[in-house]
Image: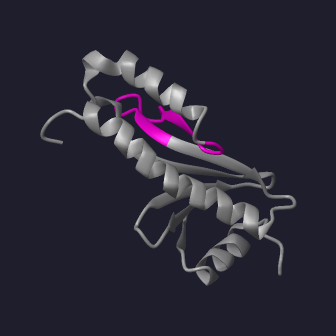
């Protein structure tokens, strides 16, 4: 098995394992069999994963403190991934799931476990966030 430390190595491996993986500029878009999109950025030291769940402005603004408490509490249960807030666009902050792995000695089973964990945790995240979504979204 070749090393899994470059975007092209990881893309080829994931496609061999049944994922759809396409490079778009510096971003690797990974899609599992259920259609969950996992975005990945790979540099010389690590691969960072992110799954976009929803925008903060899609949630009941009066219950943000309660939502934050629930997602922070859930972070202790849903390892290795965790909730975060992507604030790249200050007008559209996003609740995301994130994970990262070192690529220097990345093992195939470690990569697959991380991806499986993210997709399982998406279901947990949707259950947690669904009651707080604004009506009509």
* Pick the front one: 55 or 88: 55
Give how far across and how far down residue 86 sits, in percent: 49, 36
Note whether residue 26 is visible: no
Picture quarter with the N terminus? bottom right
Quarter of the image containing the C terminus?
top left
Residue at (83, 79) in percent of width and height: 2
In the orientation shown, which residue stands out farthest toward the right?
A: 105
Residue ranking furthest to the front: 77
Identify which residue is drawn at 87% across, 61% down: 105
The furthest residue to the left: 136
| Towards the viewer: 23 or 123 | 123
Give the residue drawn at x 53%, y 66%: 30
Query: Residue 123 appears at what percent x and percent y?
Result: 42, 51
Q: Look at 81% across and 62% down and name the residue there.
A: 106
Q: Where 28 falls versus 45 (above or below)?
A: below
Disc count in the image? 0
- Judge from the rendering whether residue 68 lies leftward or rightward of residue 63; answer left or right: right
Does 94 appear above or below 36? Answer: above
First to last magenta residue range: 79-96
């Amino acid at each position: 098995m070749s090393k899994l430390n470059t975007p092209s190595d990881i893309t080829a491996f994931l496609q061999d394992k049944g994922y759809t993986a396409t490079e778009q500029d510096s971003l690797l878009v990974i899609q599992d069999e259920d259609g969950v999109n996992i975005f990945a950025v790979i540099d010389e030291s690590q691969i960072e994963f992110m799954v976009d769940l929803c925008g903060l402005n899609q949630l009941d603004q009066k219950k943000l403190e309660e939502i934050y408490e629930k997602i922070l509490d859930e972070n202790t249960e849903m390892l290795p991934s965790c909730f975060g807030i992507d604030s790249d666009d200050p007008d559209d902050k996003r609740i995301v799931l994130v994970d990262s792995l070192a690529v220097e000695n990345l093992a195939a089973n470690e990569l697959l476990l991380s991806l499986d964990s993210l997709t399982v945790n998406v279901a947990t995240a949707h259950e947690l966030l669904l009651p707080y979504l604004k009506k009509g979204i």
